[in-house]
Image (tube, helix red, strand yellow):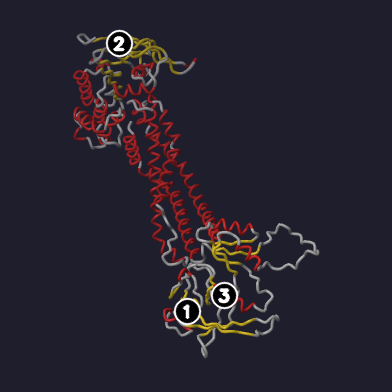
Amino acid sequence: MIEVRNVTKTYGKKHNAFRALDNANFTIPDGASVAILGKSGSGKSTLMHAMSGLDRPEVGKIIINGKDILTFKTKEIDAFRSSEMSFIFQSFFVQANESCYDNVSLPLEIANVPASKRRARIEAALEAVELLDKKKSRARDLSGGQKQRLAVARAIVNEPKVLFADEPTGNLDSTTGAVIEDLLFSYNKTRGVTLIIVTHDPDLANKCDMQINIKDGKIESIRTKEGAKS
Amino acid sequence: MKIRDTVRRAGRSLRQAKARTLLTSLAISVGAFTVTLALAAGAGGQAYTDSLIKSNGDARHLSVFPKVDEGKSEAPKEYGAQSVATKQGVLTENDLNKLKKIDGIAEIDPAYNVTAAYMTRGEGSKKYEAPLTIKADRTAMPLAAGSLPDNQVPRGGVVISEGYLSVLGFKDAQAAIGKIVTIHIEKPSRLVGAKATESEDRTLTIAAVDKKSATVLRYQTGLTLSAADGKAIYEYQTADLPTSDEYYAINVRVADGSDITVVQKAIEGAGYTVFSLQDIQETLFQFISIVQWGAAGFGFLAILASVFGIINTQYISVLERTQQIGLMKALGARRKDVGRLFRYEAAWVGFLGGAIGTFLAVTTSLFNPAITQGLNLEKGTELLQFSPITSVILIVSLMLVAVLAGYFPARKAAKLDPIEALRTE
C-alpha cells in the first residue's frame, strides 16, 4: 500500500516559488493499476518522482508498506528503489551501445545479484517481452517498440513491487503502444505488481483501476473503476 | 554494484568511444614512453659504467696522494724561519709508515715511476721503445692470450701489448706466451741533463698479451710489470738521486674483510687525498642519474599534460552519458557506484596509455645493436635495459594518476540529479 499524505513540493525560492505539488493526498492499494492523469506541467511527473524517492517534497509523508520513505537516508532510498521499484520512460533510456542482455542485466548488477543467478532471470525477462532471440543484438538496432519492450524487460527483471511508467506509449504508434500496454497490464494482473502510469492520454488512463487527475499541482479528482480492488 | 561489474561496464563504455579513448591514452603513452626509455637508458648506462669501471680499475684499490690545498687561503704565507721551500706535493717513507698503521690495509706500495730505454728479444734483434706500467691494482686486463692469476703480473713476468707481436716476430698472441724479452734500464746521472752513467738488462717472461678493448678508457701500447719488479727497477734507477724515497702516490689495497669507505675515511683523516674507484663510480652514477631523471622529468611533464586530457575527456563522457547516469540512479545505483564507474574508466585509460607507452619503449630495445654500433661500444652491450618491475610500477602509478585526474568528472557524475538527467525535453 502506498499512502501519500499532505505532500507539497515547491521549486524555486520566495517570489519565484512554484508549487509543483500542493497538498496531495491519496492511497494506492497493493496490486492496483493507477493512472496519474494530467497535462504537461501539471505536476504528475513530480508526483511520480516523489513517490519513488527520486525527489524529496519538503512537506508530507509517503508511506510505503508502513514506512515513510521521506525519512530514509539517501543510501536507504537507493537500496529501496533498487529492490522494490522499477521505471519505464517515454524515451526508453535503453543503452544504445549495449546488448539487450547487458541492458537487462543493469538493475541486477545494481542490486548486487550474484552473477550466477543473473542469467536465468535476464533470459526469463527477455522471454516475457519476446526479445530472447535478440539478446545479443545491440539496443540501437531495435525498433522503437522493441526498445520499449526491452525497457519493460529491464523493469521487471528485478521483480519489483511497484512499477512506474512515465508516458510509456508516448513515443510509439498505436499498434506498438497497444503491445506495451498489454505487457504492462498483464504483468500487473498476473504478478500483483502495483502499476503506476503517468500519462496525459485519457484512453490509457481509462484502462486503469484508479485515475488520479492532477492540475496545477493539485489533485482534482480520484476515480476508482467499478469492480476494481480498493 | 560489484567491483567486477563496474570494471566491466567501464571497459565497455570505453570500447564504445574507441577513438576518444585511444587518443586520450596516446597522450599518456607519450609520457610513459619517455619515462620508460629514460629509466631503461639509465639502467643500461649504469650497467655499462659498471663494466667500464670493472675493466679499468680494482674496487679494493685506493690511490693516496698528498693533501691538496683546497684553495681556502688565497694570500701567500709570510716567509719566516719555520718556512720550508715549497715542494710539489710528494709522499715519503714517513707517509708510507704512517699509512701502514691504519687498520684494514692488506698491501701498501709506493707508486713507482720507472722508465725503460728500450726493449728487445735479445742480442742482435731490433730495439723498440717500451713505456712501462707497474700493475699495482687487480684490475682485470682484456687478454689476447695467456692468463694472469688473481689479475696480477707474476714476478719476473711481463704483459706485452698486441702491437708488439708482429714486430717481435710472433705469428700470433699464443706464440708469444712463455718467451723471453729483455728490457734495458738506464740509471740517470745525479747531474741533470747528463748522460746515463750505468745501465742494466733485465729479462722477463711473457705471461700474457693484452689487447685494446672498447671498455678500457686509456690504453697504451707498452709493457706491464709486477709491483715487485717495479720496485726493483725503481730502487736501481733512483739509488743515486736525492728523490729516492719520494713518490707521487701510494697504492693501497684494502683487506678483503674491511669496509673500503672506512679505510678511505681513515686515510683522509690522516691528512691525505684519496682517490678510489668508488669515488669515480659514484660520480659517474650521479651524472647518469641526473641525465636519467632529467629525461624522465620531461616524461613526467608529458604525463602532467595528459592529465588535463583525461579530465577533459571524462567531463565530456559525463555530459554525453547524462541519461545513463540518471537511469542508473533511478534504478537505485548509489553515488559511490556512479563515481566508481567513471573512476574505473579513467583507470582503464591510464592502463591503456601506460601499456602502449611501455610497449613502444620496450620495442626500442630492438635498436640496441644499432646503438652499440653507432656509439662504438663494447660488442654485446645493451644500453637500453628494461625491467618488468619498473614497467609494472609505472603502469600502476599511471592508473592511479588517471583515477586522480578522473576525480572531479566522477564527482560531477555522482552528484548528478537523476530527475534533471532524465528530463526528456
Residue at horizontal 54 percent and vertical 86 percent from the top: B127
Quadrant that contains the N terminus of chain B: top left
Gap in Å between the C-alphas at discs 3 and 2?
A: 113 Å
The numbered mark, 3 or 1, whose residue comes first in the sequence reads 1
Residue A71 is left or right of residue B97, and the answer is: left
Residue A54, given in percent of the width and then of the height, sits at: 37, 21
Tag 2, which chain? A
Please tell me whether residue B341 is drawn above or below residue B83 in the rendered image. above
Quadrant that contains the C terminus of chain B: top left
**Quick one: A197 or B116, which is closer to the camera?**
B116
CB contact under 8 Å: marks 2 and 1? no
Q: Which residue is mark 3?
A: B230
For the residue carrying disc 2, how many other residues have a C-alpha within 10 Å: few (<14), some (14-19), or many (20+)? some
Q: Nearer the viewer, mark 3 or mark 2?
A: 3
Q: Do the residues at pointers 3 and 1 share their chain?
A: yes
**Quadrant in the rendering for residue B184:** bottom right
Callout 1, which amino acid? Ile
Q: Which residue is mark 1?
A: B206
Callout 3, which amino acid? Gly
Callout 2, which amino acid? Thr
CB contact under 8 Å: marks 3 and 1? no
For the residue carrying disc 1, how many other residues have a C-alpha within 10 Å: few (<14), some (14-19), or many (20+)? many
Gap in Å between the C-alphas at discs 3 and 1?
A: 16 Å
Q: Which residue is mark 2?
A: A27
Residue at horizontal 31 percent and vertical 9 percent from the top: A221
Residue at horizontal 41 percent and vertical 42 percent from the top: B399
Residue B235 is left or right of residue B173, and the answer is: right
Q: Do the residues at pointers 2 and 1 share their chain?
A: no
Q: Secondary structure at mark 2?
A: strand
Tag 3, which chain? B
